[in-house]
Image: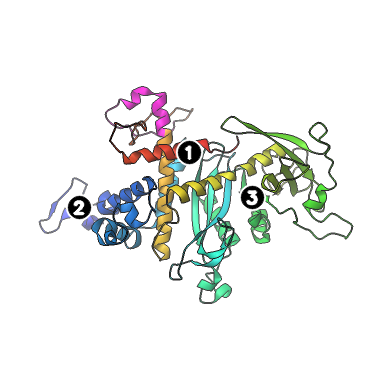
């Protein structure tokens, strides 16, 4: 490495003051890559008046502009440059975990989900005719399985991996590289545990809740979870016994809000100030019950009609507060309201799709190989995380007006023992969305984007 320091080998003289014998940071990541990284993220954060393709990010013409230097530089950066998407994601998560504003804690959830997007053709890696959740039908497209950490105040993606359909592999499902979506999801959970992400429970929709491989892996690992089920989720039982949550609900008593019977009133409070009244009931049939290792809880806005869009059938291994001690999952017990709160945080993943897909261009890539696709996704995650960081930096400025008047930036220090707060640091963005007449500023969009994140926060 000493020979690779910033020295002009033709003259034998150093070109910078970095000590001989140590690798200069500029060699660790060339300046042209840093510039391309900045240009790519700036393009992702610009107003979405066109698709976030390479020409769109470079601000050039869609056809003839693709051959110009700005687009070609981004093309090389995304497809050919020597950098690893996973290393970038590792660094992004290190920053999120080290910041007091975004550091995960034990009351949040680890959300597992998937999302599919239309993509034409057959040459792009991972693209095939398959079920795409965001359009609700089978079509040509690409599917990504992702993990996300969330609480009531903030959420951000952790890891993402593309799903490769069996038909894209030489030996189909018998190929050693084939992984089902639940298997990929288990790998994402392992990745979150490996970097020390804390959470109250793993949360996922009924696609994963109905999958025995996924649920079995969580149970074997002793991880707490709240998974959605279908109302028709059935178990083996005698003919005259209850076989599904749907049948078990028929045995519960409900006579209206004034006489709820077996149902418990749950008030969900949202960040915009409004409240919603929900109702929850604990079912007892087969291997499920409040005194057993596995519980099934139904939450709904109307026990009389059980509307499909606002009725949840939840499977959890979080112990009931009155249940005997469960050694399989050594976590704090959870009552009805806690289980409903945890699953309610899953709505963050839907908001995440809106922001990354509709604003940041998650599916707008026009590259074909796996490496470039993964890089594009990680760059979108960086842009998303950048918005949160700027949001918290702006809050510090508002609380300490003198910080905004500081000429030089002050780097934030690590939190000190005893709860010492980090000093404020100056944001790199403008301090307001107002601008002089006839002056357009490209950095106004992140302010509006972050404001949309906050307005759409889930229930607290």
**Tag of residue 452:** 1
Eyeballing the image, is 237 above or below 15?
below
The answer to if 414 sits in the magenta stretch is: yes
Task: Report, in whole angstroms, how far the alpha carbon at label 2 lies from the one at label 3.
Answer: 49 Å
Depth check, mark 2 against mark 3: the one in front is: 3
The stretch in magenta equals 393-416
Sort mark 1 into few (<14), some (14-19) or many (20+) by Cα contacts within 10 Å.
few
Percent x, y of residue 133: 57, 57
Q: Which tag, 2 or 3, sits closer to the chain's start?
A: 2
Q: Residue furthest front?
A: 438
Picture colour scheme: rainbow
Query: From mark 1 to mark 2, how far is it between C-alphas?
Result: 45 Å
Spot occupied by residue 80 in the image (x, y as percentages of width and height): 32, 63
Q: Earlier in the sequence, mark 1 or mark 2?
A: 2
User: Secondary structure under badge 1?
Assistant: helix
Q: Which residue is mark 3?
A: 223
Q: Is residue 341 above or below residue 285?
A: above
Q: Split into 4 quadrants, where in the image is the N terminus?
A: bottom left
Is 377 placed left or right of 177 in the picture? left
């Amino acid at each position: 490495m000493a020979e690779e320091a910033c020295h002009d080998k033709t003259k034998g003289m150093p070109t910078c003051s970095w000590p001989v014998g140590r690798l200069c940071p500029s060699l660790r990541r060339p300046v042209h890559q840093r510039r391309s990284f900045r240009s790519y993220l700036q393009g992702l954060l610009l107003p979405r008046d066109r698709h976030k393709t390479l020409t769109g990010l470079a601000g050039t013409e869609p056809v003839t502009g693709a051959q110009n230097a700005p687009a070609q530089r981004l093309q090389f950066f995304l497809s050919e440059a020597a950098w690893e998407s996973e290393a970038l994601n590792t660094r992004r998560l290190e920053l999120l975990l080290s910041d007091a504003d975004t550091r995960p804690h034990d009351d949040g959830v680890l959300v597992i989900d998937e999302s599919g997007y239309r993509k034409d053709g057959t040459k792009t890696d991972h693209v095939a005719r398959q079920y795409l959740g965001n359009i609700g039908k089978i079509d040509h497209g690409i599917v990504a399985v992702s993990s996300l950490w969330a609480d009531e105040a903030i959420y951000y993606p952790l890891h993402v991996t593309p799903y490769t359909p069996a038909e894209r592999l030489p030996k189909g499902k018998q190929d050693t590289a084939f992984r089902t979506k639940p298997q990929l999801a288990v790998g994402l959970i392992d990745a979150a545990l490996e970097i020390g992400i804390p959470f109250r429970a793993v949360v996922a929709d009924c696609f994963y809740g109905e999958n025995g491989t996924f649920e079995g892996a969580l149970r074997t690992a002793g991880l707490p979870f709240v998974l959605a089920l279908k109302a028709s989720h059935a178990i083996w039982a005698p003919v005259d016994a209850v076989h599904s949550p749907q049948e078990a609900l028929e045995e519960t008593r409900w006579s209206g809000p004034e006489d709820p019977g077996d149902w418990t009133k749950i008030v969900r409070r949202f960040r915009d100030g409004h409240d919603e009244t929900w109702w929850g009931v604990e079912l007892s049939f087969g291997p499920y019950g409040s005194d057993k290792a596995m519980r099934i809880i139904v939450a709904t806005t109307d026990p009389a009609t059980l509307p499909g869009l606002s009725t949840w059938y939840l499977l959890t291994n979080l112990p009931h507060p009155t249940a005997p001690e469960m050694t399989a999952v050594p976590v704090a017990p959870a009552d009805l309201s806690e289980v409903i709160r945890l699953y309610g945080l899953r709505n963050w993943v839907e908001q995440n799709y809106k922001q990354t897909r509709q604003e940041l261009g998650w599916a707008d890539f026009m590259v074909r190989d796996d490496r470039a696709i993964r890089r594009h996704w990680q760059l979108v995650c960086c842009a998303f995380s950048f918005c949160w960081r700027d949001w918290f930096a702006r809050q510090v400025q508002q609380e300490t007006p003198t910080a905004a008047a500081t000429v030089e930036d002050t780097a934030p220090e690590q939190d000190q023992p005893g709860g010492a707060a980090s000093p404020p640091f100056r944001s790199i963005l403008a301090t307001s969305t107002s601008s002089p007449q006839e002056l357009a500023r490209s950095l106004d969009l992140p302010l509006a984007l972050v404001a949309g994140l906050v307005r759409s926060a889930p229930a607290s």
